[in-house]
Structures are given as C-alpha cells and as structure tokens.
Image (cartoon, helix red, strand yellow):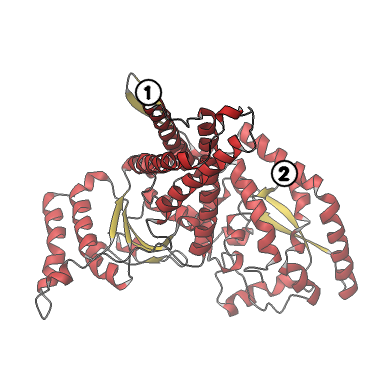
Amino acid sequence: MGPKSGEALREAPQRRRTQRESPASAAERFPPPRPRRSPMPAWTLPIADFMLALLAFMLGYIARYHFTLFRAVMETNQAPFDPYIPFAFFYAFMLYFAHHSNGLYRQMRGRSLIEELTVSANGIATATVTLLALFFVIQSVVSSRLMLVYVAVITLLLMGFVRIALRLLLAMLRARGIGVQRVLIVGWGESGGAIMRAMVARKDFGYEPVGYVDDNPRIGHVDLGRIRGLGTLENLDETIREHQIDLVIITLPWSDHDKILSITQTARESGADVRAVPDVFQLNTRQMQVENLDGIPLLGFGRMEQRFRGTDRVIKRAIDLGLVLVTAPLWAPLVSLAALAIRLESRGPVTYPQRRVGEGGREFSMYKLRSMVPDAHLMREELVQASGEDPRHPKIRNDPRITRVGALIRSISIDELPQFINVLKGEMSLVGPRPPTPDEVALYAPWHLQRLQTIPGCTGLWQISGRSNIPFDEMCLLDIYYIENWSVRLDLQIIAMTLPHLLLRRGAW
C-alpha cells in the first residue's frame, strides 16, 4: 500500500462529507460516543469490594474473638470491635487503591477469573501488610495479627464468590443481548477469522459480530451465516452508522499503518471504539510459548496439527471411555425402550447406520435409532430442494419423514445415543464437530475442511449454541474454534452444558 493510497483513503471520508447538501456540523463529524452497552455500571465492583472488605473485617473479628479459631484469646487480650472500626475503613480504602492501581477495575472483557483473583490477592496482601505496619507504628491497643490473617483469607473468599456470581449474571444477560457490543471486523484473513470464531464461540464475552468489511470485493460481499459481508472500506463511516457499530476491530497487517490510522480516525468520528490485532496474534496465544533470553522475549509458535496427538489424545480417549461406560446403566435402558417403541410403531430396522465423514476425511458408519419412515433417504434431495435449506447442513422443519416416536426421541436426542457405540469403537468422541455426510463434504469450501482435522463428536459447541438454529458457516467457525482451543476443561464444560440444552429442547427439530 503506497503513500498515495493511504492519503486517498484518509481524504475519502472528507470528500463524502463535503458532497452532502449542507455542510457537516461538528456534531455530525465528531458524534458523542455511544453509551456503553454494559449492564453493570463501572462503580459497582469498587463499591462492592469496599463493602466486602468491611464485612470481612467484621467476620475476621468474630472468628478471632468469638470462635477463637486456631488459638485461644487470653482474657487480658479481649477487645470490643469498636476500636477496630477505623482500621477496617483504612483496610478497605487501601484495598481500593491497590486494586485501582493494578487495573482491576478496568472493564476488560475476556479476563480470566484466575487472573482477576490473582490481582485481588496481591491487593489484599498489600493492604494487610500496610495495616500491620500501621499497627506497629501507632502501637494500637488492638492489634491482633492473627485476626488480620483471617480478614485477608475471608476477603479473598468473599471477592471470589462475588466475582463468580457476577460472571454468571453477566453471561446470562449477554446471552439475552443485554450488555452486548456490536462489532465490525476490518479485514478477513487469519486474524479476522480467529476473532470471528472466538466471538461466535464465547458469547459470554459480550461481543456480537455484525459483519466484516474487506478491500477485496469478492470477499467483502460474502455472508458467513448470520455474519454479513458489508462490502469494502470505501463506505466505512456509513457502514458503522447504519449498523450501529460499537466496536471496530482492525485485523490488517501492521505494514498497512497508513490505512490503519485512517480507519481508526473514520471509526472514531463515526462514534465507534477501535481495537487492532497485532500481526503476531493472528495465531492464538494458546499456541505460543514465551521464553526469555537475557531479558529478550522469544515467542515460539506451536502448530495446530499437534492438537489431539500424544498425551492429549490419550486423555481425551480415557474421558470418552470412562464416561460412556460409567453412564451405560442410564442410557442403555433408554435405548432399549426407544427401540421397542420404534418396533411397535412401524416395520423396518430399529437402528439406522449412516455413512459419515470423520477425522482426516475417513468414512465410517454412524449409528442412530431410526426416527423416520423406512427408505427416508430416497426423499432427502427432493425435500432439501423444496425447503431451500443449506444442502451442506440441511435441517428441515416439520420434516414429513419423521414418525411420531421419531419426533419424540429426536426432541431430546435419544436417537443419538447409539453413537456411544461409535465412541467405544474410537470412530467418534463425546465432544467434537458433528460428522457430515459425504454429499455434504463434496459441497465444502476449502476453509470448511478444517473441521475435519479432529475426531468428530456426539456433542460440541454447535449443539450448546443453538443446534439447528445455527447456520452452517457459523457451525464451522465454532468447530474450528474448538479445534484451536481444545482442553479437558472445555470438553467437560460442553458435556455439562449439553444435558440442560437437551432437556429444554433448544434448537431441536
């Protein structure tokens, strides 16, 4: 990108403004920032921490002087709570200043609970040590050091509990569209795709990817499910205003610094916040290792192909086998009852083996309880064409092939339980991308094939994010995010969230 191109891009918003029928006012050129889409005011957490610090001081006093935990209090050392009140307020103020200076009260989406509690623990340690020093300096008549240890521990426990509760509350509100930022991504490359996948998979962060723009018109006008291709950078300011964008994320190479500066200016003039992704972060940080060479940071980059190899694969396989075998007394009777109902309702086989594509493009037979009339596959193509569904992942509402028993067992996914046999055979996992049919894979674009890089699963991010309500492209984004971010914790979270989604029948038909 040459200097002339950068200058032309910077002049474009100004040329469009001068072409309006009336001169742009200062308010039009520099609109006030949009109100923050946050369900929790910025002062909520500091006030809560201040009150929790006072409560912890009171509970610490009770633990020391009333319950006498760990060490008895001599009669001569008994003290009322009143002399401790000034120290309690001093402790609370010190805690606030420590947390504020460490950035704990800056609203940062995506910050982990461990990181937040670590900062809290550092602040609590600072406030406790300062108060101990104050005790020593003023030689107070009340100066129980053991009580301060109780106060510190209780403070950390209370703050941890409150932060977990707030995270759950925020996740619930954001899932309902409250406190969500509408996001526009500039540039569709490796970085843009990674950002999009993370936002689609982690709705608890509170980002709604509205769409993306790209200088390549063949890319910028292509929709990805519900995420729209909003064109090129030429009309960026109109795009931001029309779609009420709160946040613009720039994923362009830093060599295009002139273009990035121009986009930043245009976005801010249009009332949106701006973030930029450094080149190095087009790879997920979980794939990077940081080493130190005499003070010089060295970043090592892992390869995605190393996922699900060696120890990771053994751990995942052990979890699959363990959970399937342990829960067999629960799911085996359900399969038997459903099979009996299918047999009583209509003739035909009870199970239905279907050819699916698994890891690395290898085909296998996936087992399901039959929920449709016999020979239903012969009507599939005609129904897909009539319904207008995406042939890469068709989900037909009110499918006439489904039997009465089939509708019941499909609504809570009992028909999927025989896939545990595929899990025992090693063809599937409990968690992973849903295996497609060979006909569907034949219609894939190259980037869709990334979802075949790992063993398919009975459940996954797609199922707990809306199941049949999720368009195909978004499903692929979720699957790729899962592959890039796999962990035992993520698998267990998905398994734990699958059951309530099945019982509530969310997105199932």
Left/right placement of residue 24 relative to residue 303 reads left
**Picture coordinates of residue 120 (x, y %)?**
45, 40
Between 436 and 496, the one nearer to me in the picture = 496
Q: Is residue 405 above or below residue 279?
A: below
The type of residue carrying mark 1 is Asn
Q: Is residue 378 above or below residue 428?
A: below
**Picture coordinates of residue 316 (x, y %)?**
66, 40
Q: CA distance from mark 1 to mark 2?
A: 38 Å
Mark 1 surroundings: few (<14), some (14-19) or many (≥20) residues within 10 A: few
* Mark count: 2
Q: Secondary structure at mark 1?
A: strand
Between 420 and 384, the one nearer to me in the picture = 420
Q: Residue at x 48, y 42 (%)?
A: 82
Q: Residue at x 32, y 51 (%)?
A: 251
Between 70 and 417, the one nearer to me in the picture = 70
Left/right placement of residue 356 relative to residue 154 reads right
**Picture coordinates of residue 183 (x, y %)?**
37, 61
Residue corresponding to mark 1: 292
Residue corresponding to mark 2: 320
Name the residue at the front extreme: 76
Mark 2 surroundings: few (<14), some (14-19) or many (≥20) residues within 10 A: some
The type of residue carrying mark 2 is Asp
Locate the C terminus by quadrant: bottom right
Counting residues from the start of the chain, the first of labels 1 and 2 encountered is: 1
Q: Residue at x 44, y 63 (%)?
A: 224
Q: Secondary structure at mark 2?
A: helix
Give the label, 1 or 2, closer to the camera: 1
Q: Within the image, what quadrant is residue 228 found in?
A: bottom left
Q: Is residue 138 above or below residue 322?
A: above
Q: Residue at x 50, y 28 (%)?
A: 145
Q: Within the image, what quadrant is residue 73 found in?
A: top right
**Does residue 294 appear anywhere in the picture?**
yes
